[in-house]
Image (cartoon, rainbow, N blue to C red):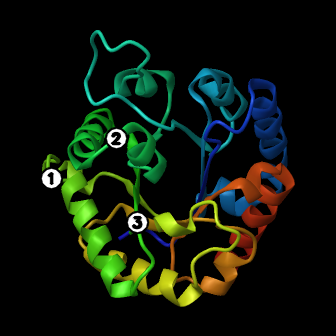
Amino acid sequence: MSAPTITLGISFKMYFGYAQTLAWCRQVADCLPRYPAVADGRVALFVLPSFPAIAPVLEIFADTPVSVGGQNLYPAPNGAYTGEVSGAMLAEMGCRHVEIGHAERQRLFGEDAASIAAKMQVALDHALTPVLCVGEAERGAPQAAVEACRAQIMQALHLATPAQRQQPLVIAYEPHWAIGAAEPAPLSHIAAVCQGLREQLATHPAASVIYGGSAGPELLTRLAGRVDGLFLGRFAHDPAAFEAVVGEACSLVAAR
């Protein structure tokens, strides 16, 4: 499993316009010098803007530890795929993360286990850290969720070589029924599922398990180290709210 860091990420989906994206990133970049734990890597941050904003966002965060990435990629190295973006281009630009397998892409665009595995392979081939979204469709017992998510992880990695399975990987546990909800899943449910996924990834030294699905303030503290971080949602569209969670994470790592 991962080193003792806290990972915080955010995907803007298609909520932000171009100017709003850059303003948010500038405000966050300006606040980072106040947080030594970000500078020394104990708190890791990644930001996933819309494709047209990636280049200027990379410039804004160029002198910071913040990783920038894409919200998607196409599962082929190059070719006649109108409107798509390759992993090679993301890596060439300087991206370090890419989101794969989000429930919305499965529901709206028909992504399935085969396409997710192909995208994972492209990401790993280009040394991009996948943010692999997993989660159960219906609310049920934690053990059922663990089994569903374990199967999704195994399917997503089945094309990876043994060496690629040791590359950095972020598992974003997002129960589908909690995405966009007013409240996150119950703490006991999050803790049990994330612990089960951590056990599965015990031999994966560079993996981390973070929680998404209406994640917001104080959730890290209430989970008391039972997750490796958060994949933040609309709450963090306010850069001050994002900074508040960064501060919370820094306080937690300082207390360890």
Q: Is residue 256 visible?
A: no
Residue type of the residue flagged with mark 1: His
Quadrant holding the N terminus: bottom left
SS at circle 3: loop
Instruction: Identify the residue at image location x=32%, y=38%.
Output: 123
| Viewer-proximal residue among 244 and 186 | 186
**How far apart are labels 1 and 2 at the CA level?**
20 Å
SS at circle 1: loop
**How far apart are labels 3 and 2 at the CA level?**
16 Å
Q: Indicate left or right for 222 with 205 as reference.
A: right
- Mark number for residue 135? 3
Instruction: Identify the residue at image location x=73%, y=62%.
Output: 246
Residue type of the residue flagged with mark 3: Gly
Q: Indicate left or right for 142 with 226 as reference.
A: left
* Quadrant in the picture for residue 215: bottom right
Instruction: Identify the residue at image location x=28%, y=16%.
Output: 78
Q: Position of residue 200 (x, y in %)?
A: 26, 75
> Given contact means CB atoms under 8 Å apart, are the residues at marks 3 and 2 in contact?
no
**Of circles 1 and 3, which is in front?**
3
